[in-house]
Image: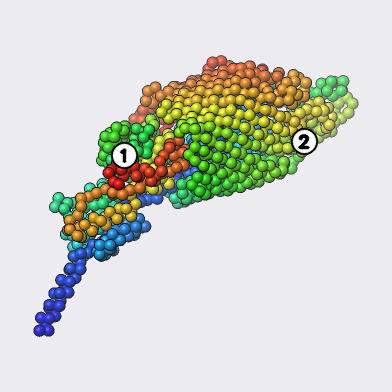
Amino acid sequence: MPTPLATPPSTLPIRALVALTLLAYLILPPAARAQATEGDADEAGEAAYLADLPVVLSATRLQQARADAPGSVMVIDRHMIRAAGARNIHELFMLVPGFQVGMHTGNQPLVSYHGLSDEAPRRMLVQVDGRSGYSPYFIAGVEWNQLGVDIDDIERIEVFRGSNSAVYGSNAFLGVANIITRAPSETRGGSLRYRAGSGGVNDIGVRLGARLGDVDLRITAARNYDRGFSAINDWRKAELATLRADWSINHDHVLEFQAGWTSNDQGTGKDDNPTDPERTARIANSFGLLRWRHAPAVGEELSVTWYHQEENGRDRFAMSVPIPPRQSGLPVTIGIPFDFDYGFRTVRDDLEIQRITSPAAKLRAVFGAGIREDRLNAPLRFNSDETVRHGVSRAFGTLEWRTSPDWLFNVGFMVEDNSLTGTSLAPRASANYHMTEDQTLRLAINRSYRSPTAFEQKSSMIFSNSAPVVTPVMTIPAGTPISQTFRPSPGLRAERITTYEVGYVAELRPLQASIDARLFLERARDLVEMRLENSTVGLIPRNNTRYFANSGEADIRGLEILATWRPATGTWLSVHHTELRIDGPGNPATASGAQPSAWVANSAPRHSSGLFGAWEFHPRWQISAAQRWVGGMSWYADAAHRIRMYRQLDLQLSHRLPPELLRGEIALTARNIDGDEETFAPRASWWGSQVFGTLQVEF
Amino acid sequence: MGLVLRILLLLLLALGSSWALAGQACLVMSEEGSAFGEAAEALGTELRSAGHRLQTLPFPLRSDDGVTLNNCTLVVTLGARAAQSVTALAPRSLILHTLLPRSAYERLPLRTEDTRRVSAVFIDQPATRQIELLRIALPDWSRVALLVGRESLELGQRLQNAAREKRMRPALAQLSEESELYPTLQRALAEPGILLAVPDSTVYNSRTISNILLTAYHHRAPVVGFSPAYVKAGALLALYSTPTQVGQQAGEAARQALATGSLPPPAAPRHFRVSTNPYVARSLGIVLDEPGTLRERLERTEGNP
C-alpha cells in the first residue's frame, strides 16, 4: 500500500450527505403516502378521461430513431450497463465499434474514437444531461473519473460515432457520448449496493428517491475503492454524491435541478522516478445545474440551462532532484530542491437556450444559443498566478425535413466565437433514404472543429529551485529558473475535420435484429501536435522542451459494422467489427529521434472486434459475456510504444432475488479473466483480471 | 263568478306549468369545467333542434331538489358525482346518465324496476373496440400487457377476453398498491408487448404516469391510452370520445326519450377519435397510419359507414 504524502482526505462531506439522505428518507414515506390518497375522490369517475397530463416523453428525452439519425448512433442502455458488469463508465466504450479503451494505469483510463491520441486523449466529447465533461484543465479531454454520475443512475448512453460540431460544438471532434440519467420519477424508493472482490475492490453505494409534493427527488452517494494494477501505485478511492430534483410546476413546465460532488484520491508516480515519486493526488469536482423546460405540446419544447462547475486539484510534493555532471557541467552531482505544486482550480459557467419546434408538418427545427466561460488557475502550468480566461459564445440550428415517407434531409450548423481561436462555422448535411420499411441508407458530410485548450496555447512550465543551492562554483539563489518543460504556443488554430460517410441501417423487426454499418472518410487537418525543441529558459538546458503546433494531419478511412439480435430486454447478442486505416505524413510528431514513425497510422488498431451477449436463461437468472479482440496500436507518438494485439473476456452471472425474500440482485463478475495484457505501452502497466461480487438491494 | 273564474284560471295555470315541465329535460352537471361545458353544449344543441328546452339545475343538489327533479320529464346527468346525487334522490322521471364510465354507472344503487327508466351513454370505449384498434394499428404486436388495480380488475378481464378472442396474448397483472408498480411493470414488459392503459387512479395517475411512460419507453413498448392527454404525455396512440361526441349521442337518446317516453339501453359512445404521437412512433421505429385512417378502419370493422 502506498503511503499518502498528503493529509488523508476527509470523508466528512459524504458522511454528512448519507446522514442527510437517511434522515430525509425517514421523513419522506409518510409524505409520499399522504400523496397517494389525493385524487381518490375521482376514483372510477370520468376525471381520468378528461385530466391533463405532463409531457413525459419530451422531444429531448426521446431517442431519435436510428433510421432517422444524421449519423451512426449506438445506444448502451441500462440493461447493457448491468450485464457488462462495469464499475466505471469508461469501460462501456469497449462495447462500441471504432473505440479504443486503454489503461495507462489502473486509475487513468484512455478512451478515443479512431485514434489520434496520446496519454491524454482529447478529441471526443462526453456530456452528462447536457453538461460537458470535457475538462478545461491541462490537456486531458474527458475526465472519466470526474463526470459526477453514478453508473447505476444512467438510463442510457447515446454514442454518436463521428464528428458533430454542428450540434455539440467544438470538441465533438471524433465522437460524442451523451449520458442520459434516469428521471427521478423512475427511481423512487431506496437502493443499496455493495461490491467486493479481488484487487481490493470495495464499493458501496446508496440511492434514495421520493416524491415530495410536485418534486421528484433522487439522492445518490457512492464510494468506490480498488488497489489498481499490480506492482504500481495506482490505487483509487472515488467518492461521489449527487442530487437531482425535478419540479413539475404544472403540466407544461418543469424545473430540473442537479448538484453533485466528486472526490478522487489516487496513487500516482513511480518509486524510482526523481521528479514523479509515488504519492497521493486528489481531484475534487462540484457542479450545479438548473434547467427550465417548457413543453406545451408534442414535439414542442423550450429550455434554458445553466450550469456551474468547479474542479480543484491537489498534487504537491517537495523533492531534491539530483543533477548529474553531464547535465549541469559541474564536476559533481548536485541536488536541487524543488517544491512541485501541480495544484489547480478551474471554474466553468455555461448558459444555453434551446427551442425545438415543428414549423410545418414535415419540418422539425432545433435552434438556440449559448455562452461559456472557463477560468483556470494553475500557477505551475501557466507560470503565472493569474487566472486564465477562455470564453466561447455559440449559435446553432438544425432543420429536419421529411420530404416524403422515403426521404429525410437534415442540415445543421454551429457558429462559435472562441476567445482563443476566433470564429468558426461548423456545417453538417445528411440525407436518409428509407429504401424499405426496414432499411435505410444514409449519406452525410460534416465539418467539425476542436479548439485548442488553454493549456495547449498558453502552457509555460518552468521549474525553479525552492531553496538556495550551493555548488563548487557558485550559489544559486532560491527562485532561479532551472528547467523549462513546456513553452507557450501562441497562434495555435482550431483543428478541423471533414467527414464523409455512407451509413446503412436495418431494423428487422420480425427477426428482432438490427444492423448498423458505417463507411467513412475523415480528413483531419491542422491537428495540434506536441513538438520538441531546445529550451530557451533555465539554468539547465534541455533538448525536449515541449510546445504545440498545427502540424498534423490524418486521413482516416474504414468500416464499422454492428449487428444485434435482441429477442427480449434481458437477452441479446451483438457483434461488431471495425476496419480502420489512418494515413498521415511520415514525420514523427515528437522529433525525439527515438524511433520515428508515422504516428497517426499507429494510433488505432487496424482491426478490432467484439462480441457482447446476455441470456436470461431462466426467469431472474442472466448470464452475460463480452469478448473483444484489439489489434496492435500505439497511444504514444512513436513505434517504441506500440502495444501488441490482445483479447479480453468478461463474464457475469446475475440473479434477481425472489421478491418475497428481498427485492434486488446479486451478481458475480469476472472481468478480463483470460490473462493480463499491456494496453498502454510496453513495460508501463499490466491490465489484470478482476473478480468481484455485487449485491444490490432495493427497499 | 269571480271566484269560480279565479279558481279555473289557477287550475289552468297549474296545468299549464305542469305541461310546460312535461316536455322538459333537466341537466345536472358534476362540475362546470370545459369538458362538461362542451358536452352540455352538444346535448343542448341536439335537444333545441327538436324544440325541447334544457334547464340546468345548480350542483350540488339539495335534498328538496327531489321535487324539482320529479317535475322534469327527463333528467340528464353529466359526470359520476351528478349521477350519484340524482340516484340518491330517486326521482320518478326518466334518467340519462352520461359522461361517466361504465364502471361508475354499474356501481349506482339502481333497483331492477329502474332499468326501464334509467339509461346511460358512457365515456369509455368498449373492450372489443380497444383491442380491435391494437390489431389494426399495431398488427406486428401480439402481446398486450394490462396493469390493473382492484377497481379495474373487471375491466382488465373484459379486455383480456377480448384480446384472446382476437388471438392476441394478453398478460394481466394486478397491483394492490403503488409501490408494486415498478417491479410489476418491469415483469410485464420483459417480453416485447403493448401496454394498454386502463383508467384506474391507483395505477395510472399524474404521479405514476411519468414512471409508467418512461419504463415502457425504455422497454420499447408502445403505450396505448384512453385520452388525448396520454398522447401528449408520450403514449403512442389513444382511443377516446370527445365530450362533444358523448354529449351529442346523449342528446339523441334524450330526444328519443322525450318523444317516446322510453330510453335506449345503456351504450358506449358510437363516435370516437384516434390520436397518435408521431415522434414516439418514429423513436420506437413503428410505422403508424394517420389517425384519421385508423379511425375509419376501426369504424368499418364495427359496420359504421
Identity of the amino acid at label 2?
Answer: Pro
Q: Quadrant of the N terminus of chain A?
A: top right
Depth check, mark 2 against mark 1: the one in front is 1
Whether residue A220 is visible here, answered yes or no, is no
Point out the residue furthest to the right here.
A473
A430, above or below A635, in the image? below
B178, above or below A79, in the image? below
Q: Which residue is mark 2?
A: A488
Q: Percent x, y for residue A263? A: 59, 35
* Residue name at image x 37 percent, y 41 percent: B224
* Residue name at image x 63 percent, y 40 percent: A427
Q: Secondary structure at mark 1?
A: helix
Whether residue A506 is visible here, answered yes or no, is yes
Q: Chain of mark 2?
A: A
Identity of the amino acid at label 1?
Answer: Glu
Q: Quadrant of the C terminus of chain A?
A: top left
Q: Secondary structure at mark 2?
A: loop
Query: In terms of depth relative to the viewer, which is nearer, B250 or B89?
Result: B250
* Residue name at image x 41 percent, y 43 percent: B290
Mark 1 surroundings within 10 Å by alpha-carbon count, few (fewer than 14), some (14 through 19), many (20 or more): some
Q: Percent x, y for residue A627? A: 52, 20
